[in-house]
Image (spheres, rainbow, N blue to C red):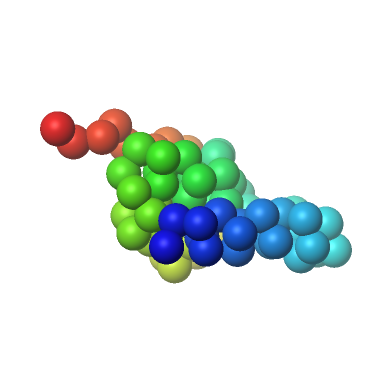
């Protein structure tokens, strides 16, 4: 599952994102967050960010949404 998510994010970054104007107000961007979160928490939890990405909600988080540390 993780490999499929990485391929999807890679495809988005290479083929889709360059054709559209930048619109992600978050730091890090949703695709970067998903990759970082999957390294820390696994593909399921990391991929949730892609499903809940809503640029309009960024102001409530001061445009910052770092990956939380892994739970032990």
Residue 64 spot, x, y in % from top left: 47, 38
Residue 69 falls in image quadrant: top left
Viewer-proximal residue, 2 or 30?
A: 2
Point 66% across, 55% down: residue: 10
Q: Which residue lies furthest to the left in this view?
A: 72
Q: In which quarter of the image is the N terminus?
A: bottom left
Point 50% across, 46% down: residue: 35
Point 32% across, 55% down: residue: 45
Q: In which quarter of the image is the C terminus?
A: top left
Q: 13 left or right of 55?
A: right
Residue 8 falls in image quadrant: bottom right
Q: 29 left or right of 51?
A: right
The answer to whether one can see residue 38 in this image is: yes
Q: 70 left or right of 50?
A: left
The answer to whether one can see residue 59 in this image is: no
Viewer-proximal residue, 67 or 14?
A: 14
């Amino acid at each position: 599952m993780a490999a499929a998510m990485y391929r999807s994010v890679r495809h988005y970054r290479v083929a889709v994102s360059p054709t559209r104007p930048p619109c992600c107000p978050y730091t890090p961007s949703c695709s970067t967050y998903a990759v970082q979160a999957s390294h820390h928490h696994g593909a399921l939890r990391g991929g949730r960010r892609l499903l809940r990405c809503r640029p309009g909600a960024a102001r409530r988080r001061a445009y910052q949404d770092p990956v939380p540390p892994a739970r032990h």
